[in-house]
Image (spheres, rainbow, N blue to C red):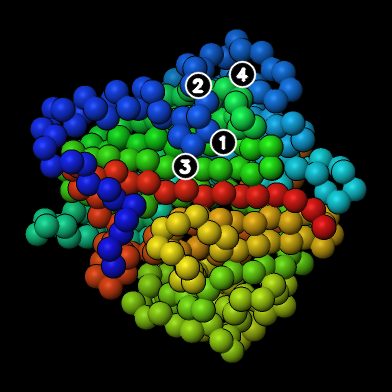
Amino acid sequence: MKDSRFAPLNDWLAPGAVLFLFVLLFSFTSCGTSGSEEAPATAEESSTADTVQVRSYGETPDGSATLFTLRNVNGMEVDVTNYGGIITAIRVPDNRGAMGDVVLGFADVKGYLGEHPYFGALIGRYGNRIGGGVFTLDGTTYELDRNDGDNALHGGPKGFHRQLYEAKTINPEAGVRGVSLRRVSPDGEEGYPGNLDHTVRYLLTDENELRIEYEATTDAPTVVNLTNHAYFNLGNQPTILEHELMIEAERFTPVDEGLIPTGELKNVAGTPFDFREPHAIGARIGEENEQLELGLGYDHNFVLDRKTDYALERVATLYAPSSGRFMEVLTTEPGLQFYSGNFLDGSLTGKDGKSYEKRSALCLETQHWPDSPNQPDFPSTELRPGETYRSTTVYRFSVR
């Protein structure tokens, strides 16, 4: 499948000129679609309505972390830290106007320094699993750091979720405010080839949309699959079983015992994986089904029914009857990993002293498909010098 995320630069540009042009363009245009000016982040910046608040968030092994609070004219707020590109909070109203935080996480950076299931984190270089922790590219076999049995998961034990990013605020303009995070992942990090220069922008609009934009370039052939791992609970209930989910997908990718895709694309019709119409998550999660048993619930990639390859389209909705909160998911990606929080076990205590129990939240991770480097029939995740990786996902909030 041809992947239009990767747009080759003009052939006449010499390598040195390509690098110079990239740096020049980044300096002037890296705030993406917002058209807003970026400013270096400092923890001394103050907060006003419709702006970006910047404050210290604590110490990490690589230096001081910063927390950015994006606030729009409606009072919606999103907290993001440059440690791991983590979304630490999303505060939106319910249908009575009461504000509530709809994502799992911790009160300070210390919680994210310990072991946790990627709460709100930027995931890279490769979101989801690579079977056996190995792949071959251009005849060279790369051994990755394995952190999920024999498999590599979410970029490895020291993936992007444990890195400190250079940050710049995106000042409010035309109803958008945000923060831009940039880092170069060095050649060989967690076993991946090539120096990967990547940027992620978190943008909050006055339409109550959290827009996440990803860009990356490389100096050697590599694979890349970036996503965010926010855990959502839109309701006023301890679990997400009441949530009504819709996914625009006629097929999903079945998995083996290691949760690695078998290569088959299976039709969802007549199975608990049919979310083409809104359906309560708890209604079928306990059914006798081999795939549900392997995942201990839903932990599967859905093959999105796209009208246009890599255009921004709505692919899923999530509704919580107890609060009236409604979330739409739009993406340019071909896949969506629906994870129903099966491995949460109450051992972690998060914000406000809450114990995060089984299925207390869910993830909707926009992505290319798991194990694509080892699956030639899956959409390619290869990125080569002279190409630019681009991906956009939007989480849009409203009430019913």
Which residue does the numbered mark 2 point to in the structure image? Answer: 37
Tell me if label 1 and label 3 are in contact, CB under 8 Å.
yes
Question: Is residue 141 visible to the viewer in this orientation of the structure?
Answer: yes
Label 1, on which residue? Answer: 203
- Number of the front mark, 1 or 2: 2
Identify the mark nearer the N-term, 2 or 3.
2
Q: How far is mark 1 from mark 2, CA to CA?
A: 13 Å
Spatial distance from mark 1 to mark 3, Cα to Cα?
8 Å
Which corner quadrant of the image does residue 162 belong to? Answer: top left
Judge by depth and name the residue closer to the eye, 144 or 234. 234
Secondary element at tag 4: strand
User: Could you tell me the amino acid type at mark 1?
Assistant: Leu
Task: Give the Cα distance between marks 4 and 2.
Answer: 20 Å
Work out whether 229 lies above or below 306. Answer: above
Which three-letter amino acid code belongs to the residue tagged 4? Arg
The answer to which image quadrant residue 97 occupies is top right
Real-space Cα separation, disc 3 to disc 4, in angstroms: 23 Å
How many residues crowd mark 4 within 10 Å: few (<14), some (14–19), many (20+)?
some
Residue sitting at x 80%, y 44%: 93
SS for dot 3: strand
Please state the total of marks drawn on the protein image. 4
Disc 4: which residue: 55
Q: Is residue 237 visible?
A: no
Q: Is residue 106 left or right of residue 390?
A: right
